[in-house]
Amino acid sequence: MPLRLIERISTWSGYLSAVLVLASMLIISYAAVLRYLVGASTIWQTELVTYLLMFAAFCGGAYGLQHGDQVKIDLVVTRLGPRTQRVVRLVAAILGCCFVAALAVMAFDMWWETTREGMTSGTAWDVPLTYPHLILPVGMTLLTLQYLVVIAAIIQEIRHGGAETATPESRHEREGIPT
């Protein structure tokens, strides 16, 4: 899969995540107004908002990784030379990729079991869990693919001995990719 396609998918998953966060906010506001004005409650809103926010968190993670918004602890790394920093970032990216790939495999197994057994949420809405359980393997797969893009970019920088550290923003500026 070409790296630019992965980056486009990550970008769109980030945009979709933002829309789903907005939709969650509107649904919660609707439920609050309905409860306050009419005294009625909805049986579906809490569960739906939970699933929408799950998607935003897990599938939007690839967008965060693409733009360097992941959690970083660089107290020691910033004191290293540029080449050593790149090597440390490469090792961290490889470990991160392996971790999320393993999570993707385990999440796929969980999803498959849920689908095969026809499990439902057991709530009043009784959603088939095959849909919300698909969010985790999809999100972890997107993260794995985005990690491969990050790894490729760091390897490219190590090979070419670039003066700047590899941030997605600096790479996007060099390649003319809008951020």
Image (cartoon, rainbow, N blue to C red):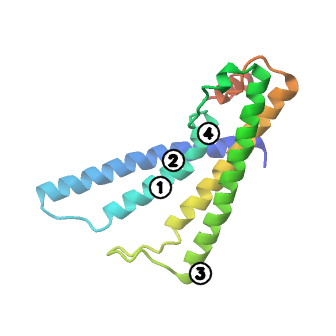
User: Which residue is outermost to the right?
Assistant: 159
Task: Tell me if I can see residue 145 in this picture.
Answer: no
- Work out whether 94 lies above or below 157: below
The residues tagged by marks 1 and 4 sit, at their Cα atoms, a distance apart of 17 Å
- Work out whether 134 lies above or below 62: below
Percent of width and height locating residue 90:
75, 36
- Work out whether 77 lies above or below 21: above
**If you read the primary sequence from the N terminus, does the residue marked by circle 1 or circle 4 appear first?**
1
Q: Badge 4, how many Cα within 10 Å: few under 14, some, many 20+?
A: some
Tag 4: amino acid: Leu
Q: Badge 3, how many Cα within 10 Å: few under 14, some, many 20+?
A: few
**If you read the primary sequence from the N terminus, does the residue marked by circle 4 or circle 3 appear first?**
4
Which numbered marker is on residue 116? 3
Residue at mark 1 = 54
Residue at mark 4 = 65
The residues tagged by marks 3 and 2 sit, at their Cα atoms, a distance apart of 28 Å
Asked which quadrant contains residue 160, the reply is: top right
| Residue at x 76%, y 28% (from the top left corner) | 86
Looking at the image, residue 145 sits to the left or right of residue 23; the answer is right
Tag 2: amino acid: Leu
Tag 1: amino acid: Met
Element marked by disc 4: helix
Residue at mark 2 = 16
Asked which quadrant contains residue 105, the reply is: bottom right
Tag 3: amino acid: Arg
Nearer the observer: mark 2 or 1; the answer is 1
Element marked by disc 3: helix
**If you read the primary sequence from the N terminus, does the residue marked by circle 3 or circle 1 appear first?**
1
- Work out whether 38 lies above or below 117: above
Element marked by disc 2: helix
